[in-house]
């Protein structure tokens, strides 16, 4: 039976080689199963018919039964059109075609006087209603479609041209469904019973030709579940196979370095969440199996300290660690923090980025080779082939979603046994996204900020209130604080954006003149040395205001800065706004975030600004962000491919995802090889359609 669904599409009655070509090129439909999985993108309620005198001008499509009484070609050349009169017992209206073939004209001529079902969007023109390019068929034909919701399939111009109308698509689907005798199950009976799913054949029947909305809902819920379920099953199998395949270094002892630091040099009491996470990591590192862990924590939750403590465990066991960040500034910042944390300890740390001088590089490579260097911090420069460790035991990747997932793997080759891997995200991501993108990793969450922090106060100000904002900044500076002013830099409009930045810088320099005030500027067009110099002036407190583009977005840590002004805030995404805001509120002082915008925001921009003013909770903000943008856009194009579901939606179907994950876990717990007869359908389907078979063969 499964082989039946693999039949090339041209053999389906009503297709043939010509249409097959079109279906392949336009919709990627090569086989029966592809057609079956080409779902309608919407449905029309077929039980409702309109009378001509009930027409109103609206965006909704209508269905009318009537007879065509008259047909003529009007106009010349490009203005030429075909106009037909449609009548029912309540009145008359016009049907109009601007593009039509001879064949269509003849078909319409033939249908004069025959009861027809007309479908389309009515509009009013000169006081009369018409429908442009309606769909039409005889009442007789129309009755051959099962009653209920009328499926509408996506289409292209070429398909229209080749005569594959929506009606044809319906017929093909109906033909296929009628030929399918029996469909192999893909789920176990216990799962089907647990969720009261329709049988598989009925599911496909109902997704294409639902009798009613409830029917459709049932079909959708099963198909969404299956999408999530098989993805989760694949991820969980990958995770299990990692654990059985990839042996790694066993860090048996927590020794001298860790303990000395912990007891004597820890600059603050760890939060409960930090302690819990360290414990989770320690437990992973103590096993001879590669750690693959994701660390999620809000901006300012103290991920760096967790990273450092983990690296000290590696050091204690005679291993080196690498910490990779996505930008130079961030790598530098990590290096500075960790150097400072380790000031009174005897642990060698170095920084390697694209701009590290050759001479210094040579020294680093030597010490790395000899094992003298314990911790290497850097950018993707760390991935280069000439970076050779003596004994790399732990790799920490910060701000993962800027790196491709593939880069995780590059580190594996840097030792004979792959190092343990800890991935840290810049900002929280919603649980459903984490589950789908990182479902093969273990997850730790820091869900608590260090105590004593005052929540940042966020306000929205219009550009017209700039003077009041400047006054506020002056008052804060008078108290000894420092201020960030950030400008957007959006790809495609850089030229204008740089102009805005420079204009802004000038205006601020004028309003905050020397010698009372000093202003730094940092942006992406500057040389790294100049950037670093300006940053340092601000970090040391020599300047009070830092004007910047988003280069300061990640990681920068100046606890004395208490005001973040974000210019044109409506142009930033939510997670970016939250990242930027996280640059303040790092000291003991009350901090502020001022979102400057123009007047007249659109709805989503308004919602973003409002969300920022209402909450400081990164997990909550991430959730809203996903609802507004959709998961694909939120994560950037790099990973959106993994988030392409046919029906399921990570933002809307969270419950389904949770259930699917849970079911997949339960299944593997009970029957990791899926050897039980009752799980055979799942096993067969998985092996046929998922590429993770290889991973599976590894599970012992
Ligand atoms: P993020 O999670 O955003 O990377 P960081 O590691 O940069 O956060 O920490 C933010 C700030 O909080 C730093 O100044 C750090 O020294 C401080 N910090 C971290 N943990 C604690 C703690 N438990 N108590 C007080 N301050 C802390
Ligand atoms: Mg950080």
Image (cartoon, helix red, strand yellow):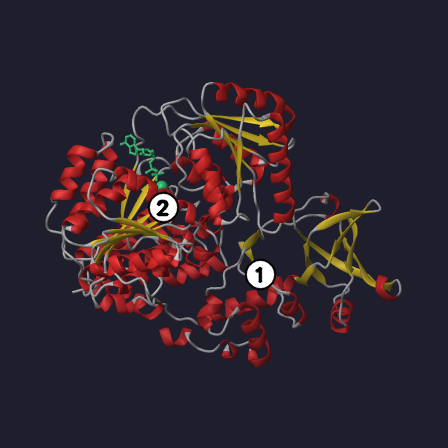
Residue 601, numbered label = none
What residue is disc 1 on? Answer: 154
The picture places residue 230, in percent across and down from the top left corner, at 33, 59
Left or right of 605, for residue 338: left
Question: Dot 2 lies on which element?
Answer: loop
Q: Secondary structure at mark 1?
A: loop
- Image quadrant assignment for residue 449: top left
Earlier-in-chain disc, 1 versus 2: 1
Q: Which mark is residue 425?
A: 2
Q: How far apart are labels 1 and 2 at the CA level?
A: 37 Å
Query: Is 647 on the left or on the right of 435, as rendered?
Result: right
Q: Quadrant of the C terminus?
A: bottom left
- The residue positioned 33% from the left and 52% from the top of the image is 438
Please count the marks in the image: 2
Residue situated in front as seen by the camera: 267 or 591: 267
Q: Position of residue 400 (x, y in %)?
A: 37, 51
Is residue 674 placed above or below 258 in the rendered structure?
below
Give the quadrant of the N terminus.
Answer: bottom left
Q: Quadrant of residue 411?
A: bottom left
* Along the line of sight, the residue nearer the viewer: 304 or 315: 315
User: Can residue 519 be seen in the rendering of this structure?
Assistant: yes
Q: Are marks 1 and 2 in contact (CB under 8 Å)?
A: no
Query: Residue 440, image x and y in percent?
Result: 29, 55
Q: Quadrant of ligand 2?
A: top left
Residue 59 in the image, given as x and y percentages of width and height:
67, 46
Q: Nearer the viewer, residue 510 or 681?
A: 510
**Residue depth check, mark 1 versus mark 2: number of the one nearer the observer:** 2
Residue at image position (46%, 30%) is: 542
């Amino acid at each position: 039976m499964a082989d039946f669904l693999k039949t090339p599409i041209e053999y389906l009655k009503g297709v043939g080689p010509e249409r097959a070509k079109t279906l392949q090129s336009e919709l990627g439909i090569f086989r029966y199963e592809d057609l079956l999985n080409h779902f309608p993108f919407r449905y029309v309620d077929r039980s409702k018919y309109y009378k001509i005198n009930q027409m109103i001008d609206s965006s909704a499509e209508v269905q009318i039964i009537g007879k065509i009484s008259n047909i003529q070609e009007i106009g010349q050349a490009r203005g030429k059109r075909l106009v037909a009169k449609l009548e029912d017992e309540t009145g008359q209206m016009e049907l109009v075609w601007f593009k039509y073939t001879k064949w269509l004209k003849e078909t319409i001529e033939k249908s004069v006087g025959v009861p027809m079902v007309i479908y389309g969007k009515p509009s009013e023109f000169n006081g009369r209603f018409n429908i442009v390019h309606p769909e039409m068929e005889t009442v007789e034909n129309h009755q051959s479609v099962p009653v209920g919701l009328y499926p509408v399939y996506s289409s292209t111009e070429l398909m229209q041209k080749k005569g594959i109308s929506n009606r044809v698509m319906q017929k093909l689907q109906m033909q296929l469904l009628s030929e399918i005798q029996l469909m192999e199950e893909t789920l176990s009976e216990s799962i089907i019973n647990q969720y009261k799913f329709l049988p598989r054949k009925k599911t496909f029947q109902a997704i294409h030709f639902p009798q009613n909305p409830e029917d459709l809902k049932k079909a959708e819920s099963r198909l969404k579940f299956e999408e999530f379920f098989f993805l989760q099953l694949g991820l969980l199998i990958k995770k299990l196979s990692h654990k059985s395949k990839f042996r790694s270094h066993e860090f048996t002892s927590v020794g001298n370095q860790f303990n000395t630091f912990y007891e004597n040099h820890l600059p603050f009491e760890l939060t409960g969440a930090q302690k819990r996470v360290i414990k989770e990591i320690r437990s992973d590192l103590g096993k001879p199996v590669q750690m693959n862990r994701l660390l999620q924590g809000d901006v300012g939750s103290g991920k760096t300290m967790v990273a450092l403590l983990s690296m000290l465990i590696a050091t204690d066991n005679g291993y080196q660690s690498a910490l990779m960040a996505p930008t130079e500034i961030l790598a530098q910042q990590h290096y500075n923090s960790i150097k400072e944390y380790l000031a009174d300890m005897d642990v060698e740390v170095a920084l390697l980025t694209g701009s590290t001088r050759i001479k210094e590089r040579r020294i680093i490579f030597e010490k790395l080779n000899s094992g003298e260097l314990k911790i290497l911090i850097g950018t993707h420069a760390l991935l280069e082939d000439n970076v050779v460790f003596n004994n790399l035991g732990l790799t920490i990747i910060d701000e993962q979603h800027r790196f491709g997932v593939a880069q995780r793997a590059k580190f594996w080759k840097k030792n004979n046994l792959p190092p343990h891997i800890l991935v840290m995200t810049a900002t929280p991501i919603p649980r459903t996204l984490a589950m789908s993108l990182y479902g093969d990793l273990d997850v730790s969450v820091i869900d608590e900020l260090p105590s004593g922090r005052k929540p940042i106060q966020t306000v929205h100000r219009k550009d017209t209130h700039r003077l009041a904002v400047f006054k506020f900044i002056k008052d804060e500076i008078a108290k000894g604080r420092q201020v960030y002013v950030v400008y957007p830099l959006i790809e495609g409009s850089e030229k204008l954006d740089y102009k805005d930045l420079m204009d802004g810088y000038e205006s601020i320099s004028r309003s905050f003149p020397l010698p009372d005030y000093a202003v730094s500027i940092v942006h992406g067009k500057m040389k790294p040395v100049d950037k670093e110099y300006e940053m340092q002036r601000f970090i040391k407190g020599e300047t009070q205001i830092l004007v910047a583009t988003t280069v300061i977005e990640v990681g920068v840590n100046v606890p004395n800065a208490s005001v973040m002004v974000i210019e044109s805030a409506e142009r930033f995404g939510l997670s970016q706004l939250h990242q930027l805001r996280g640059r303040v509120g790092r000291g003991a002082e009350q901090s502020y975030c001022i979102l400057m915008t123009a007047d007249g925001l659109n709805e989503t921009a308004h919602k973003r600004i409002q969300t920022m003013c209402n909450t400081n909770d990164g997990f909550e903000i991430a959730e809203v962000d996903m609802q507004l943008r959709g998961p694909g856009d939120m994560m950037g194009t790099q990973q959106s491919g993994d988030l392409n579901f046919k029906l399921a939606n990570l933002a809307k179907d969270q419950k389904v995802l949770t259930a699917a994950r849970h079911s997949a876990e339960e299944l593997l717990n009970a029957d990791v090889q899926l050897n039980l007869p009752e799980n055979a359908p799942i096993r067969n389907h998985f092996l046929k359609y998922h590429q993770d078979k290889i991973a599976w063969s590894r599970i012992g």
